[in-house]
Image: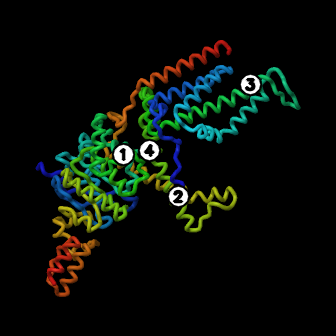
Amino acid sequence: MADTIIKTEELAFSYPAEEGQTPLAALNGVSLEIARGTFVAVLGHNGSGKSTLAKHMNAVLLPAGGTVWVDGMDTCDERCLLEVRRRVGMVFQNPDNQIVANVVEEDVAFGPENLGVPTEEIRRRVDAALKAVGMEEFVLQAPHHLSGGQKQRIAIAGVIAMEPACIVLDESTAMLDPSGRREVLDTVRRLNREKGITVVLITHHMDEAAMADRIIVMDGGRAVMDGAPREILTRMAELRAIGLDVPHTVELLYGLREDGFDVPVDALSVEECAGAIVAAL
Amino acid sequence: MLKDITLGQFFPGTSLAHRLDPRSKIIITVVYIVGLFCAESFVSYGLMAALLVTGVKVSGVAPKALVKGLKPVLFIICFTAVLNLFYTPGEILAQFWVFKITKEGIFTAFFMALRISMLIMGTFLLTYTTSPIALTDGLESLLGPLKKMKVPVHELSMMMSIALRFIPTLIEETDKIMSAQKARGADFESGSLLDRAKALVPILVPLFISAFRRADELAVAMECRCYHGGEGRTKLHVLRYHARDYLVMGAYAAILASVLTLAHFGL
């Protein structure tokens, strides 16, 4: 099973409840495997447990039931804690709250510094990580002068500098404007393709999920759907039932189909959709 | 507008004063202050003043910026000078009502004002030529021996650098909250001092809540990046003493020694 980077088995978790209330289960027996080098999107509306799942992937939260393995290491094993966190890097929602230093290079160096990497090696990694996210000309800038998308790319560089096998993006694009979102998504997609880093993208944007290799849909603390984007994103009725939407292209094609046009419903990009409509006319 | 405020007022540059190791700069500033308090005569004060002028010249910092730094403490300087002027016993030069001005009083007042001004300008020279990060790094390294006495040196310097990092973020946030309150009809500019102070409460409460939330998130983010205290930590920038550091520190030691010798002989 060398090809599985993250594996969960019957993972359950509930947040501590207020006094007098029964604790609400955030995760209810999630079993899944994430293959090394893949790009996986986790979809779900608010409260579906997708962020809670993400936090289990690098031992920020420890399972109340079941087990999580990262590269064969049980996340409950305290001796493996640092190694688990090194292998699975996490990028959070708010870029301001995850940048530690007031110079870009110092911030990117934070991870390797904590790991006790020798100075020359830190220098090499910082430069390589900044190059990988296309921010090399900002080495000596102060982070608060950067845009949201740039800050998130710095946060990604900070994770890459630890040379992880997997990056988990916990709604990292939620606070960004469209151009910032594109910057971040292009960056992680490139890292996935060129460096073979596994990417787990937690999101509620359908169009972001559409670019993944695989989509896992969460609802009520369970993984309810799991498959290729084309297969998942065209199940309009099921997605709507759990409060999610389908991409606009799929919605349009469904409408055309109901009106008697013979079109496929699995076009995820605008170009593909246009092509399908032209072909049907 | 609030965003442009910087704390510690660092002027970037490449002069010798900028390139010195922060530790040597901290050491020579302390030595300089000790020297100031030992100086008792025109000769030794002249020596200390010459040292300051050389420092300013070498650093390329505008003397105007240094003098500006004195403004907030002008009152304290005047107050100490006046106190010394009237309350030093000695040869009386002028007398009216209960006030006596003595020859010694004039000297002490003059020297005291000079001493405080030079002390402040000397420390400003340090912060003007050293970036806040270098300063924290230097302090951490210099206070290193205290770790043996269980003083959390690494934690303190980490706190300091995070505080510096979040100043612009929190200022921006204050700006935002103020605008939000103003849009809802809050008035921060008119009324008595008490009214204005009271108007600040609705700004401080959300600011504190958000600061706590930020702290929480930052702590998780730091843990995710394998932060586990100062143990086994390496650094991107390792502080290293160069020949210039030894040279400058040697020169300072020599000058301090001469000031002490002069003081010993009552000069």
Q: Nearer the viewer, mark 3 or mark 4?
A: 3
Check disc 1 and report the residue beneath it: A139
Element marked by disc 1: loop
Relative to A38, residue A47 above or below: below
Which quadrant would residue A43 be assigned to in this image? Answer: bottom left
Q: Which one is nearer the viewer's eye here, B21 or A42?
A: B21
Element marked by disc 3: helix
Q: On what subunit does the disc labeled 4 rest?
A: B
Check disc 2 and report the residue beneath it: B175
Left or right position of A38 against A82: left
Of the numbered discs 3 and 4, the one sitting upstream in the chain is: 3
Check disc 3 and report the residue beneath it: B107
- Distance CA(mark 3)–CA(mark 1): 53 Å
- Distance CA(mark 4)–CA(mark 1): 19 Å
Q: Are marks 4 and 1 in contact (CB under 8 Å)?
A: no
Relative to A86, residue B174 above or below: below
Are labels 3 and 1 assigned to the same chain? no
- Distance CA(mark 2)–CA(mark 3): 49 Å
- Which amino acid, by three-letter code, is at mark 3? Phe
- Distance CA(mark 3)–CA(mark 4): 45 Å
Of the numbered discs 2 and 4, the one sitting upstream in the chain is: 4
